Image (cartoon, helix red, strand yellow):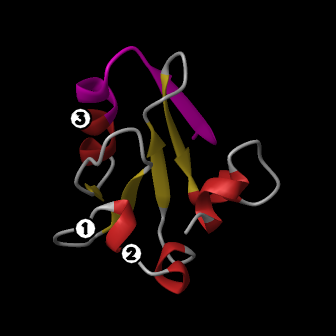
């Protein structure tokens, strides 16, 4: 499996994540969108405490030239690592 994927639309990215078994958080402007494997509802980014963000399985980054899905393995040491630690 690729470590991250790029999509032309948010709908495509969300659909792919759901097909892979990820629950997708609610959108909030251009903030990251949380991904959690085998979860029910996932909150908006601003409502997720930092310690819980570190437990997420991935994020959707909606403000790149293409929509980026970064799975947990991408978080540490990637160009998106600061998003996992945003407050």
Q: Which residue is mark 3?
A: 15
Q: CA distance from mark 1 to mark 3?
A: 15 Å
First in sequence, mark 1 or 3: give its number. 3
Q: Which residue is mark 1?
A: 42
Q: Where residue 49 appears, x then y in whole percent?
A: 45, 81
Q: Which residue is mark 2?
A: 48
Range drawn in magenta: 1-13
Quadrant position of residue 79: top right
In this rendering, the label closer to the viewer, 1 or 3? 1
Tell me the element at label 3: helix
Instruction: Give the residue at x 17% y 69%.
Output: 41
Tell me: 75 left or right of 67: right
Closest to the observer, 46 or 76: 46
Tell me: 85 left or right of 9: right
Tell me: 28 left or right of 62: left
Quadrant position of residue 16: top left
Q: Where residue 51 appears, x then y in whole percent?
A: 54, 85
Tell me the element at label 1: loop
Relative to 15, residue 74 above or below: below
Return the residue found at the far right: 77
Please tell me how crowded label 2 is: few (under 14), some (14-19), or many (20+) other residues with Cα within 10 Å: some
Assess whether mark 2 and mark 1 are in contact (beta carbons under 8 angstroms).
yes
Q: CA distance from mark 3 to mark 2?
A: 22 Å
């Amino acid at each position: 499996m690729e470590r991250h994927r790029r999509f032309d639309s948010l709908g495509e990215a969300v659909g792919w994540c759901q097909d892979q078994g990820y629950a997708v958080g609610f959108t909030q402007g251009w903030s990251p969108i949380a991904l959690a494997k085998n979860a029910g509802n996932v909150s908006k980014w601003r409502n997720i405490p930092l310690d819980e963000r570190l437990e997420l399985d991935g994020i959707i980054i909606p403000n790149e030239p293409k929509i980026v899905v970064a799975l947990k393995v991408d978080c540490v040491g990637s160009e998106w690592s600061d998003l996992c630690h945003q407050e």
